Image: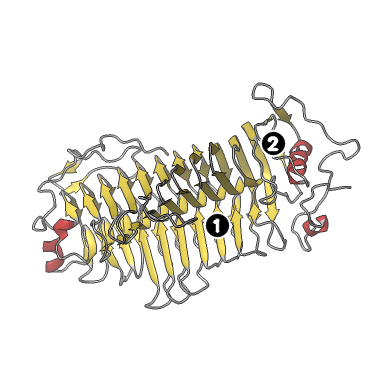
Amino acid sequence: MMWRISCNISLILFLFVGQLLAQTGDWYNDEGGYTFEGLGTKREPFLISSVSGLTYLADQVNMTPGNSYHGVYFMLTKNLDIGAHYWISIGCDAAHPFQGNFDGNGKTIYNLYINNSNSEGYPASGLFGYLSNGARIENLTIEGGEITGDVSQSISYTGSLAGYMLCNAASSEDSIIIRNCHNKHVTVVGGETDHSNTGGLIGEGYAFCDGDGAVYILIEDCSNTGDVIAASSNYPYTGGIIGKGRGHGYCDGAMSSSGSFIISSCMNNGTITGGRTKGDEAVSSAGGIFGYGYASGDGYGFSDGSGVFMVYLCVNNGFVKGGNASSPNAMSFAGGIFGYGDGYGYGDKSSINDTINNGNGYGSGKFTITSCANRGIIVSGNASDKETITSVGGIFGCSSASASGDEQGKGYGYGAFSMRNCYNAGDISGKRGCVGGLGGWISTNGNGPNHTLSAIIQDCFAAGTVNKNEQSSAVSGGIVGRIRKADKANTSPRIDRCVAALSYLNGIEGNTFRIVGQLINSPTSSRFLSDNYAYVSDGNWGRVNTIRNGIEWRGLMSAPPMDEWNSAENAWQFPRSNNVMPRLRGLSGQINVPVPY
């Protein structure tokens, strides 16, 4: 039997010693090759009706020189069972990406097993390994199996559908689209590498424009029910849909670049387990939808660089546990939707390629999350000592806005984080660090004289409990555990028109309050908070805490803003399973916001 799948290494590497599954049967008929039925056009796509056909596609992409099938269309016509074979990804490395259109046609691929834990040269693990410009994967379910990521290199990308996506353009527009794709009970295990990006569907996606153009990656109407298990790593980023995503616009000269990353209408029901940190100052980040999200824009000379990261109408119902912060000065973040998110902008008047010093480069990074909900239990990882940090929240673990403009006064940076119309009904717990009903920690950080920062949470709702069963030494808040305004930041973070309706709130005495547990670098709450309301039925309360979190703290509403308020019982009446957000009177944009299951 000939395997014919070649990626510049000996194919004997795939016959792993001690594999649990037997390698039996032919992938396809090697006598005389294989021919796709169809023309490969949109109207008459190449048809794949057997495992042999799917394997032939992988062979053609992975061979040297390979065929990326850019602009070519494929359609799956039958359910396929990979069975007793270990799969080799379509697009096995960065030199052999898949760029075609693959329509799953509502079909299912069963029993997908990949084991790269003993391999060399395959950092991207999934049905597809590498996807690049123009790739479209739609209408496909993968059911049953296990994906184990690579351990041989410094970085690994692991997902059931695809390991790594890169959409990169210097002077044009392009995209990658993942739509209506589903992981159904495929276990995804990250590779133990320095950087380990692990997702139920996708390991990592990067939309990067470094010239006069625009690119985007869209993940839409996708779901995960598989367990996602991170490996120990310096930087383990782990999510139900995707481990890490980034939108980045970078340009130098008189041009404009934009890179956007968008996640829309996705859902996770799987269990997400964050990775333990290994090296000094390591960061672990885990979330129900994604682990780490980053919007960054860099503008040099006369250019305008813009990065965007957008998330909306996403839901997590699964259990999320943050990774243990087990190394010196390590950080661990966990949230129902995401672990860590940042909007960063950098502007410099000088070109990096020459000596021009009279430009006005502008860079902006905008991270936005809208109309998302968490119903799952969220638990922080353990912190090994006082130098480590954990942060956990119903929607996010940590979020920030950061920017830098050059000191001479012509470059400009804009960094923004915003969250609106989001809802948490899951129980949150963390023994140390920062814990909040919606978020653990939100901060701003700016450098240089020319920058603007915006970090804001508006029209959001937190229910459930915070640290009900924990003897916690955490900084805890009904909305956010900690707000920090960096010394050089020219704009404060804000929380406006939000409601905390918790049945229990507990944390360290003196740093547990109904809206925000701790304010850093601001003497008064009025700089951070306006028109919020909190009701907590039970918790660890002293007299000072109760007063500070009652109507005597400026910025709180004078009356409950909800139609479901029961004045006789002094509580809100609504089931946690509502498929719409609680109806909040007088708050913008929050009347019957749909929250899909």
Image position of 121 (left or right of 565): right
Residue 25 picture quarter? top right
Q: Nearer the viewer, residue 46 or 15?
A: 46
**Residue at the spot of label 1:** 197
Residues tagged 2 and 1 counted as in contact (Cβ below 8 A): no
Amino acid on which disc 1 is placed: Asn
Q: Nearer the viewer, residue 193 or 315?
A: 193
Image position of 582 (left or right of 233): left
Callout 2: helix, strand or loop?
Answer: loop
| Residue 185 visible, this angle | no
Place of residue 124 in the rendered image (x, y in percent of width and height, measured from the top left): 64, 53
| Residue 436 visible, this angle | yes
**Residue at the spot of label 2:** 69
Image position of 529 (left or right of 102): left
Q: Earlier in the sequence, mark 2 or mark 1?
A: 2
Residue 339 picture quarter? bottom left
Place of residue 536 in the rendered image (x, y in percent of width and height, measured from the top left): 20, 56
The count of marks equals 2
Q: Is residue 458 above or below residue 115?
A: above
Residue at the spot x=36%, y=65% of the render? Answer: 430
Callout 1: helix, strand or loop?
Answer: strand
Place of residue 441 in the rendered image (x, y in percent of width and height, measured from the top left): 32, 61
